[in-house]
Image (spheres, rainbow, N blue to C red):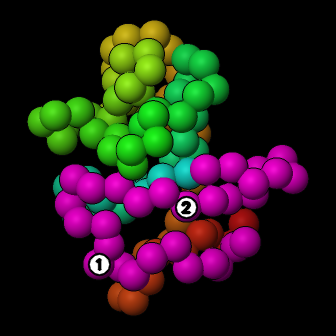
Amino acid sequence: MPGEVICPAAAPPEGESLKFRVVRGGREVEAFLIRFEGEHRAFLNLCSHLPLPLDSSDNDFFTLGRQYLICKTHGAVYGPADGCCVSGPGSGRPLKPVRIVVDSEFVRLHGE
């Protein structure tokens, strides 16, 4: 729901992720929150190539070097700052962003 708290503003640590649920099209779907270069970003947990979760249920969305997000099923690689596909299947199709608001205490869903 808009304004719902996802986590404290200090979470997740840099290069880590946190899953949460959002409502899209009248149904609840999985999303994930990351912190990359000090900024929080959130996306639906769906590969742009085929609508399957990126993380294969282990809550780890980053490549080994923690520089990109990766779909562990298809190998599509995404830029964590904007969700744009930079290589692999799905090139040119970005991850679907989830709008968030970060204040001094919490990360919340944007009140759309």
> Which residue is drawn at the image coordinates 45% and 34% (left, top)?
56
Q: CA separation, marks 1 and 2?
A: 16 Å
Quadrant of the image occupied by residue 46: top right
The local crowd at label 1, few if under 14, some if 14 to 19, many if 20 or more residues have their Cα within 10 Å, is some
Q: How many marks?
A: 2
Tell me where the magenta segment starts and ends, as one range: 1-30
**Mark 1: amino acid:** Ala
Secondary structure type for disc 1: loop
Q: Residue furthest left?
A: 65
**Mark 2: amino acid:** Phe
Q: Residue furthest top?
A: 89
- Image x and y of residue 60, in percent: 33, 44
* In-image side of 8 versus 98 (left or right): left
* In-image side of 22 versus 41 (left or right): right
On residue 10, the disc is: 1
* In-image side of 96 versus 56 (left or right): right
Q: Work out which quarter of the rendered image holds the C terminus and state it.
A: bottom right
Q: Is residue 15 magenta?
A: yes
Q: Residue furthest bottom?
A: 105
> Which residue has dot 2 on it?
20
Q: Is residue 97 visible?
A: no
- Image x and y of residue 84, in percent: 42, 30
